[in-house]
Image (spheres, rainbow, N blue to C red):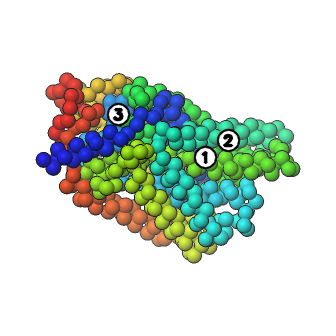
Amino acid sequence: MAQALATQELLAEKQKLKKSLFRLDLIFFTVAAIVALDTLGAVSSQGAQAIFWLAVSAVTFLIPYGLLTAELGTAFPVEGACYEWVRLAFGHLAGAVTAVMYWISNPVWLGGTLAVTAIAAMDTFWGKPFGGIGNIGWLEFVVGAAFIWIAVTWNILSLRYMKWVPNLGAIVRLALLALFGLLVILTGTSKGFAGNLSGWTPTTGVFVAVIGVLVFSWIGFELSTNASEEMEDPQRDVPRMVVGSGIISALAYAVPIIGILLVLSTKDLSNVGSFVSGYQTVVANAVGGTAANVLNFLVGLAIVFSLLTSGTVWLMGADRMMAIGALAGSGPLRLGRFSRRFGTPVPVNVTSGILATAFLLANVIINHALSNGSLSSLFAVVLALAISTTTFSYLLVFQALEVFRIKFPNQPRPYRVPGGMLGAWIVTILTFAYVLGATVFSLWPGLFTSGVTGPASNVDRGTFEITVLVTMAIIIGIAIVFYYLGRGHAVHELLPGEGAPAGDRQLTGARRI
């Protein structure tokens, strides 16, 4: 009886969802998710080898990841897709860990590297207002908190009307990156390049340093599938979204990274400031004078808006997934409520904002009280946390493809990974290996290199490891608590769209799993 009530309650909450996403929306949504400006500096700071590993990872991770997402997203087009895929494949506990890690990584990111990069852009392009926002602890917190709660407010409002945020965000950042590419060319032809593209020879040290941020940069294909039941036609649109957004995103990363390496000398490359410094350099070189001041203000505004929409779009997907997880038995039931007016998971949205604000406050305190205000050191620690929590959540998501091929062989698959079971195994192994490596090397930078015990991004090794490992342990602990809190209303039924088990020809209603 309790199980039937839990299933009915989940289905009742899904009735509040509204069809809002169409094909172009999905492409823009995914571009806004994948192309994140805050990681450009971290990638380019590794020099010309970054371009080599960017190309290698595009072929050996981005493409397999896209193929895998296209099959899962069209065969199992359900709200909260990442959670549901893991729950159906491995059970509620695995689903709870995946959901919590995937969800919490976004408040960590929003209150961390996104807010830090936005503040760095304001200080760089707007002439250090108030003496430099990043130099004044209380002001840094106020500006960062405003940044967070704008994103949260946009998430609370209806997706039907607020989808313009990721759409416009994708357009703005693509225009911004195109302008940067043009200014790089103008700078090179008029004054030459301060940097170069030499040093392509791949090394283990750079691969270990860059794999985490590259994987973190590429992920995002599956984000829109967490709102599958708000799509007009996921079976048709998801594969086209993967192709379109994948091509655009690859170009959107290659152009600025090459540009940064050309206009900045090696000594000027940094994880937090390379992109904004590169932009400021080419603006000054290409236009100069008063025009440069005006363009700097507009570019700074565009960068801050792009960063804000990155956080917004990830909250849109991750909060929906966590809400479904809570409703299905992997979290507190109240966390899964959707607003009847807006069709959005307001309790999760607000909780995300609170977590992001708390994380921002902790960052500001650590930065100004313990790290002498070093944005670079703070950025390194926060980025490691964001990468490790995010990539860890994908470990079981990617393995669901093989499990579903065996467990639900009769489920209609409008798109299938080519090559039969061998092809499915290849894309599963490649994607799993990348996210595993990204997680490990983010938690322990320099592993398998001579720097294994030395400072991590200029942060004492002990301080760095205690921070990231304790944070990871706390989040996993929260996931386990959520699992126990959700056991009383756990859903053990197959809902519409969730799979046709072996022996069934088609899905006709709810089934036990």
Q: What residue is at 37 percent from the left and 35 percent from the top?
A: 229
Locate residue 393, reporting x and y percent. Answer: 38, 50
Locate residue 476, reporting x and y percent. Answer: 34, 60
From the viewer's perspective, tell me whether residue 384 is left or right of residue 505.
right
- Mark 1 Cα shell of 10 Å, populated few (<14), some (14-19), many (≥20): many
Task: Give the mark toward the camera: 3 or 2.
Answer: 3
**Three-letter code for the amino acid on which mark 3 is drawn:** Pro
- What secondary structure is marked by label 3? loop
From the viewer's perspective, tell me whether residue 262 is left or right of residue 382.
right
Query: Can residue 354 be seen here?
Result: yes
Residue nearest the observer in this picture, 197 or 396: 396
Locate residue 180, reporting x and y percent. Answer: 71, 41
**Residue ID for mark 1:** 306
Q: What residue is at 56 percent from the left and 68 percent from the top?
A: 364
Q: Quadrant of residue 366?
A: bottom right
- Mark 2 Cα shell of 10 Å, populated few (<14), some (14-19), many (≥20): some
| Mark found first going from the N terminus, 1 or 2 | 2
**Residue ID for mark 3:** 77
**Residue ID for mark 2:** 176
Q: What residue is at 63 percent from the left and 68 percent from the top?
A: 139
Disc 1 to disc 2, how far (Cα)?
9 Å
Disc 1 to disc 3, how far (Cα)?
28 Å
The quarter in which the C terminus is drawn is: top left
| Mark found first going from the N terminus, 1 or 3 | 3
**Three-letter code for the amino acid on which mark 2 is drawn:** Leu
Check whether the beta carbons of the residues at disc 1 and disc 2 lie within 8 A of each other. yes
**Three-letter code for the amino acid on which mark 1 is drawn:** Ser
Residue nearest the observer in this picture, 10 or 441: 10
| Mark found first going from the N terminus, 3 or 2 | 3
